[in-house]
Amino acid sequence: MNPVEKPPDRAAVAAAGMPGRTPPAEPPRVSVDLASFSYSPDGGASLFTLEATTFDVRSRELLAILGRNGSGKSTLLRLLAGTLAPLSGRVKLEGLEVSRMDLRTRAQRIAMVQQETPLLFPVRVWTFVMQGRYPYSRGLRFETDDDAAVARQALFEAGADPLRGRWMHKLSGGEKQRVVLARALAQQPLLLLLDEPTLHLDIAAQVDLLRRLRRIASDRGYAVVVVTHELNLAAEFADRIVLLDRGKTLRVGKPAEVYQQALLQQVFGTLLSVEFNARGVPKVTFSGAETD
Amino acid sequence: MRPLTPRRLLLTCGLLAAVLLAVVFFSLKFGTWAISLHDLVVQLFRVTMGHNDQVTSDFRLIVLDIRWPRIVLAMIVGASLSVAGASFQALLRNPLADPYVLGVSSGAALGSILALIWAAQLPGATPFGAFIGAIAATAAVYFLGRRGGELDSYALLLGGIITASFLSALIMFLMTTISGRELRGMAFWLMGDLSTPSPVSAGWLFLVLVLGVGAIYTTAADLNLLLGGEQEAVHLGVDIVRVKLVVYLGASVLTGLAVSVSGAIGYVGLLVPHLIRLMFGSDYRLLIPATALGGAIAVVLADTLARTLVSPTQLPVGAMTAMVGAPVFIFLLRRNMA
């Protein structure tokens, strides 16, 4: 098995160049079919319900999940990650139900970048990224030279190669985010999930990160799902948007279809205006005091 | 470029084993009864060659029958406590975790005293009692340390301190029911002491040590990921329920083993893993065997000091480790809070 991914297919790279374009026709990689979830502590009345939702994610596609705090974005992400099993319906990755996969298989196919990565003891960047190879090893899991090659490639793609010898706890927010992304890439997943990856990043680092994700999706053929609060970045870089409101999936579609002034105002509870630029990419601006 | 290779693992452990050998050699030499380096080497050579008839009776009595068994116990206890400490640190995600600080040692001590009172005639009763006590105390501390469904670093330490003081009170209560002559031995044992020979043979103790450390070692690669958070570990494919169960039982067995032999020797499980991390990094695949060897070195050294410092009187080894360990604990605590 070649540890380093094959060079990207040229047509796909060309097609992926511009944001906002139609993704190349691929069979759905992830299919979410009427999946729902409900948190009910101690079996009592449910505290939060994610109502049945249906959408799919294709290979090379970047999908953004938007919504207010508490709208169910993270719950949906955990359903996609398989760490939560849906109450009803199904979440499948290439035909297999994600919550029923064995842990190792799942970690070889789905990688997750979390908001916080707390570390108990100092670890170097290189060692941290090598952890992404864990699902592929056995026994004491001594990493092989092939693992090192994959990790090196992942560092390059995440733009974190110069950080290789640094300590994790001495990195800035943006640097750390790139290293965490590199570890996820070292898992060589089919599906890459990110929970608010732009949180705590300055605007340059946010744009850099989304541009990288866009490129990774195209080059590697990964399906990438990002939970974010950054409406304009999502409009610029995502192929499609899932808009959630209080556990309900209001709309799934291209940014231009989802970004409608009335809809966004209803979801975010504030006055917003939506304009479209020459490429047809919507741009959201805050336009006044809060609505009731 | 690989973080850890089998070669590096073997070299590091080989180096520590060599240091351990040297420490054992000097521990055999030093004590109230003096023996010259030359005599020690000659006599040891005779013993290893099987010429037991040429060994002097003084040497046989002092070095072979008193010092050597005590060193063996020190090595077993040191290795157990250190690996238990490193395991608790990963399991509870707390760099200050240690069987003594968490009150797990007190649980084991209470378990062993109860076993002594109720089932002294059964072989292996005290180590088994200590194991049960350690398991119960760990469970208690674990639940006291939870806040809002998550383990809280300081609630955990506080839970440990409270558990330890409560258990000590129970132990005091039980000790008042034990006759005066045994009391002094008990008090010494509680402070952590290696001068009383173990009721169980060293071979058995060693077997339990190997099984306990071996079980924990099978999870070494998983523990590395667990240090970065449970959710993260799950996403990387770690079966955290299995790992936590193995480490919890393994660390309780090791604590029970150490306490049933030597009472509550404090801070070894805290100091040794930290020192090993400073020297060789925090990869558990290396840390666990290195910590076992490092713990053996530390307790043999501490016990040699305890035997010789105010010779001919002997200090309990727990007093030695606490004198060094408590200030270092404060230092780590302050650094952790900063």
Image (spheres, rainbow, N blue to C red):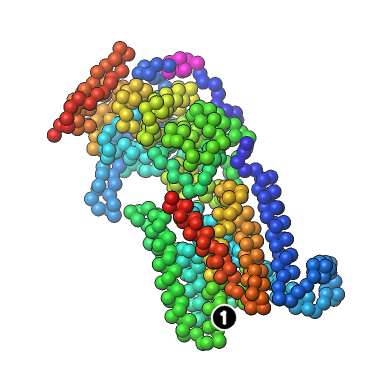
Left or right of B169, for residue A243:
left
Q: Residue furthest front?
A: B310
Circle 1: element type: helix
Could you say where residue B248 lies in the image, as x and y percent from the top left? 49, 59
Nearer to the camera, B265 or A155: B265
Asked whether the viewer can see residue A105, the reply is no
Nearer to the camera, B177 or B326: B326
Could you say where residue B53 lies in the image, as x and y percent from the top left? 85, 76
**Disc 1 sits on a residue from what chain?**
B
Residue pointed to by mark 1? B185
| Quarter where residue A4 is shown | top right
Q: Which residue is depicted at the point 59% across and 31% down?
A: A149
Nearer to the camera, A13 or B147: B147
Task: Verify whether residue B172 appears in magenta.
Answer: no
For label 1, the crowd category at 10 Å Cα-Cα, with few meaning under 14, some 14 to 19 and many 20 or more, is few
A254 relative to A151, above or below: above
Amino acid type assigned to the residue bearing label 1 in the image: Gly
Q: Which residue is depicted at the point 43% across and 76% down?
A: B170
Q: Which residue is depicted at the point 64% across and 78% down?
A: B313
B242 relative to B316, above or below: above
Could you say where residue B243 lies in the image, as x and y percent from the top left? 50, 52
Look at the image and give the residue range highlighted in magenta.
A10-16
Left or right of B63, for residue B159:
left
Task: Verify whether residue A15 appears in magenta.
Answer: yes
Q: Which residue is depicted at the point 19% across and 32% down?
A: A269
Task: State whether the magenta stretch is mostly helix, strand or loop.
Answer: helix
